[in-house]
Image: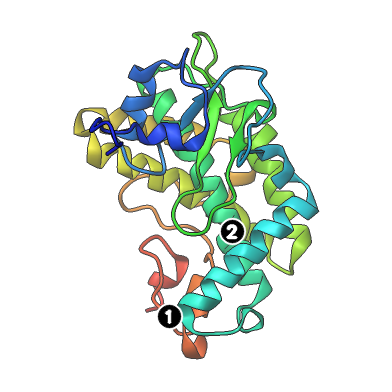
Amino acid sequence: MSRSGRRRDPRRNLNVPQARAQPGVLDELAALGPFFAVQAHRPGAAPEPSWRPLAELTQPPGLEERVGLVRGALAARAGYSASGIELRVAVSVTQLGVVARIVAPALAALTVQQPLDLRLSGLWWQDTAGGPVPLSVPEPAGGVLASPEQLLDEVVTPITVTAAALAPVSPRVLWGNVASAINGAASQVAKARPELAAAAWVTAATFFRHSQLSTEPGPPGPSFRRSSCCLIYRLAPGRNGPICDDCVLARRR
């Protein structure tokens, strides 16, 4: 609460212009969960203080900085030094988190046929530790609804290629992360909005048509299991931590 007794709008703390935002679209996404919620800024505006262009994560210095922050956070949680976390695990976890953050609102917007501009040049982010990173998009203005192929080619692929160059982690693992993020987003939409379940899975299937996801054992759905592992189990002592529900290792355990 502010001193005047009025409840403060949490969006104001993020220094994002809100004058022309379309709250209906943003609220509909936010209701699905934190990975779907986005802020909005004026199209063509330069990032304001605390915000950064997402495009920097397609370049080694920018993504490497993010990996360092995630690696430190993982180490602190596990009681290790940063060097105790394998670099390839930190890279995989970082790429999965960033991709999931981008894919979730994209899939939801396509599912409900709401305009959302997710072209790389207009996306902002904040480099925070813990939870989904804050993401800001150009204000919904109608007519801008990126296709799954466009999003994967122009945003997800450059981030994934850069991640593969930072550590000896297989592209199959990284693209498996993408598949997992897509399936997870559709699953959350189906859970939060049962009336949209069929549409969400259809949208997820259009993502899976991308050439880089052709090796995944589709189709997406509640029983989907990816063809690789995100490596997060290796954070536990003895490299024997829990595995994700959609992990290829689930069959072995």
Q: Tag 1, which secondary structure?
A: loop
| Residue for badge 1 | 241
Residue 246 location in percent, x, y? 40, 60
| Along the viewing direction, whichever of 5 and 209 lies nearer the viewer | 5
| Along the viewing direction, whichever of 120 and 187 lies nearer the viewer | 120
Q: Residue at x 36, y 19 (%)?
A: 23
Q: Which quadrant of the rendered structure holds the N terminus?
A: top left
Q: Residue at x 46, y 76 (%)?
A: 77
Label for residue 1?
A: none
Q: Is residue 187 left or right of residue 177?
A: left
Above or below, 157 relative to 146: below
User: Mark 2 or mark 1: which is in front?
Assistant: 2
Q: Amino acid at mark 2?
A: Thr
Residue 63 location in percent, x, y? 71, 54
Asked whether the residues under the numbered discs 2 and 1 touch, taking CB atoms below 8 Å apart as contact, a structural biologist would say no
Badge 2 density bin: few <14, some 14–19, many ≥20, Cα 10 Å: many
Q: Amino acid at mark 1?
A: Gly
| Along the viewing direction, whichever of 235 and 19 lies nearer the viewer | 19
Q: Residue at x 32, y 41 (%)?
A: 33
| Residue for badge 2 | 94
Residue lying furthest left = 194
Residue 101 location in percent, x, y? 50, 44
Q: Tag 2, which secondary structure?
A: helix
Query: Which quadrant of the structure image shows residue 189?
Result: top left
Above or below, 247 relative to 197: below
Residue 141 location in percent, x, y? 50, 10
